[in-house]
Amino acid sequence: MSTHTNLAEEALSEEAVEAWLRSHPDFFERHLALLDVLKLPHASGGAVSLIERQIGWLRDKNRQLERKLLDLVQLARENERLSQRMHHLALGLMDADSLDAVLATTQEQLRTEFRADHVVVRLLGNPAQGLHFVAEGDPALNSLESLFETRRPLCGRLSDEQLKALFPEADTPVQSAVAVPLMDGNRRLGILALGSREDTRFHPGMGTLFLGYLGEIISHAVATRLKG
């Protein structure tokens, strides 16, 4: 009898036990007493029962979920504040009665609401129309051609050539920036650029969804005034 039992125990591998327990997840519910008998090593030394180990694991899991929940709440609050800023900007642009008023409103609100040290709108057109206009074939814009090809904002540490094209009159170094293409359908209108003295203010990992909305709002306001 003893020999038969030993042979059975040897034939029962750890993998087989694990597979059987996975296929019978209610096993310990039917044998609750085993939870206090089974012992597992603990990081602090000694051993704890399986049920104590499970409680500890659940506590750790709960703390992780709480941290994730707090991160989601913080993100939701930031998105809500950003939505409010976009709303205020849209209202301001609706009240602007000229192209100059659109550009002035854009610069004022983006500096205050979006904490940008530099706000520049470079419109494509005849430079004789005003300081905000630059010729579409201007070599200075070659480094920003990808903006119009991808129709996606650039975020983070831009190249020296790009910074020089966007912020030629910046009186303080631009450590991080955002460049957003302004489009009217397939027509290129220009570029919106935000610059900061902080190297972490604008970064490649930031969401570009709201930046895309920002570009659409300003593009619409600019296109409407240009047509008028």
Image (cartoon, grey):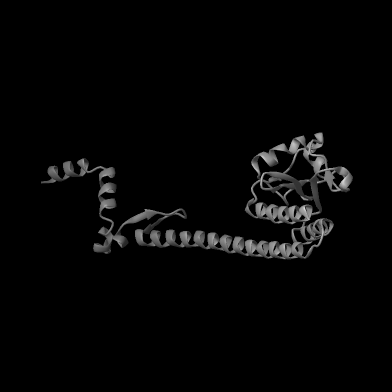
Query: Number of marks in the image?
Result: 0
Q: Is residue 25 above or below residue 174?
A: below
Which residue lies at the image location 81% right of the left edge and 54% below the top edge? 117
Which residue lies at the image location 43% right of the left edge and 54% below the top edge? 42
160 vs 65, nearest the viewer? 160
Q: Quadrant of the C terminus?
A: bottom right
Residue 2 position in % (x across, y down): 13, 45
Which residue lies at the image location 27% right of the left edge and 59% below the top edge? 26
200 vs 146, nearest the viewer? 146
Residue 33 position in % (x across, y down): 27, 64
Q: Quadrant of residue 90?
A: bottom right
Residue 56 position in % (x across, y down): 43, 61
Q: Quadrant of residue 126?
A: top right
Q: Is residue 40 left or right of residue 7?
A: right
Residue 171 position in % (x across, y down): 89, 48
Q: Is residue 53 left or right of residue 205?
A: left
Q: Is residue 126 left or right of residue 58?
A: right
State the residue lying farthest toward the front. Answer: 228
102 vs 172, nearest the viewer? 102
Q: Quadrant of residue 71?
A: bottom right
